Image (cartoon, grey):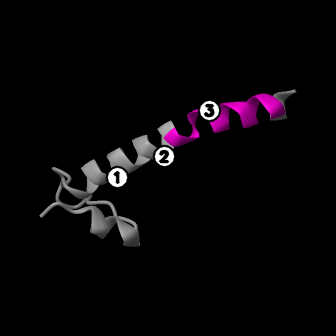
Amino acid sequence: MMKRLLSRCLRRYGKLIAALALAITTANVNSCCIWINHQPELPDGANNLRKF
């Protein structure tokens, strides 16, 4: 029962979650942290999302 519910939710909201993750990654790539010593490392493919 729980496995079926989880599978149904992933099918229904999977594209939404992927689009949201892409939007958050794009916003993260195009900004910097205000604390100089805490700029987190980005994934290798994230540099392709830069706008500048």
Q: Pointer 2: what residue?
A: 18
Does residue 41 show up magenta in the picture?
A: no
Q: Residue at x 15, y 50 (%)?
A: 34
Q: Pointer 1: what residue?
A: 25
Give how far across and how far down residue 32 sits, in percent: 18, 55
How crowded is the residue under tag 3: few (<14 C-alpha within 10 Å), some, or many (20+)? few
Q: Residue at x 48, y 37 (%)?
A: 16
Q: Amino acid at mark 2?
A: Ala
Earlier in the chain: of badge 1 and badge 3, it is: 3
Q: Residue at x 62, y 32 (%)?
A: 12
Question: What element does badge 1 sit on?
Answer: helix
Earlier in the chain: of badge 3 and badge 2, it is: 3
In this view of the protein, which residue sits in the foreground, 16 or 36? 16
Q: Are marks 3 and 2 in contact (CB under 8 Å)?
A: no
Q: Are marks 2 and 1 in contact (CB under 8 Å)?
A: no
Earlier in the chain: of badge 2 and badge 1, it is: 2
Q: Amino acid at mark 1?
A: Thr
Query: Given this view, does label 3 or label 2 mark the residue nearer the observer?
Result: 3
Q: Amino acid at mark 3?
A: Arg
Query: Given this view, does label 1 or label 3 mark the residue nearer the observer?
Result: 3
